[in-house]
Image (cartoon, rainbow, N blue to C red):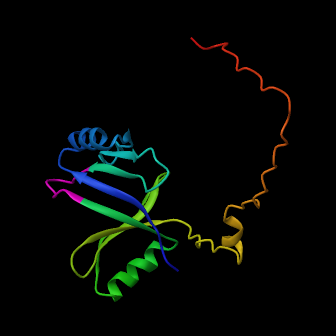
Amino acid sequence: MAAPVTHFEINARDSKRANQFYSGLFGWSIEPASDATTGMIYGLVNTGVKMGINGGIGQTQADGPPSVTFYVQVEDVQSHLERVVALGGRVIVPLTDVPGMVTFAQFADPEGNIVGIIKGPQTPAKKAAPGRKAAAKKKVAPKKKAATKKKSSAKPKAKSRKGRR
């Protein structure tokens, strides 16, 4: 089954500066979601629009390089990590559970690109019902013939000047 991209993450050496930059540039609202027990500095990004995906901006770990990662949602993170290895990739961050927030992992593809996977349900795309496309088209009523006006012997009424100046 195909899996959707559901989250992006921007990791910066100075996450406060990155938050200001991206919120100023794109109008994103960023809600702090840091964890004092682990020292994780993170902000959840809400883009404020229905299309696209939301994400996060975090602090790199101990002089780590800045990076951008996207996350793909799957039902079984561990089985996907096993497939990563079988296909020539390598596990970067093993299966990790952040209580009350997310279960995730990260891997490097054979070219070295870092990609994340997040645990979540898979919902197949809805297929349009047969004939639904035709029903969705705007229905147009047939044009009626214009009624012909009967000529009247009465004088036409003078137009009111009320409201004109």
Foreground pick, 87 / 46: 46
Left or right of 138, for residue 48: left
Left or right of 149, for residue 73: left
Q: Quadrant of the C terminus?
A: top right
Residue at 25% x, 38% y is: 20
Name of the residue lying farthest toward the left:
63
Image location (x, y in percent) of residue 142: 76, 61
Q: How many marks?
A: 0
Foreground pick, 79 / 110: 110
Foreground pick, 45 / 51: 51
Q: Residues in magenta? A: 59-67
**Quick check: 25 above or below 55?**
above
Image location (x, y in percent) of residue 79: 45, 79
Name of the residue lying farthest toward the front:
153
Foreground pick, 115 / 78: 115
Q: Is residue 62 magenta?
A: yes
Q: Does the magenta stretch include residue 2?
A: no
Indicate the quadrant where residue 34 lies: top left
Residue 143 appears in the picture as rendered: yes
Image location (x, y in percent) of residue 13: 17, 49
The main secondary structure of the magenta stretch is loop
Left or right of 140, for residue 34: left
**Quick check: 6 above or below 3?**
above
Image location (x, y in percent) of residue 156: 77, 26
Residue 95 appears in the picture as rendered: no
Residue at 39% x, 82% y is: 82
Indicate the quadrant where residue 70 lies: bottom left
Residue at 66% x, 14% y is: 161
Residue at 30% x, 62% y is: 69
Indicate the quadrant where residue 95 lies: bottom left
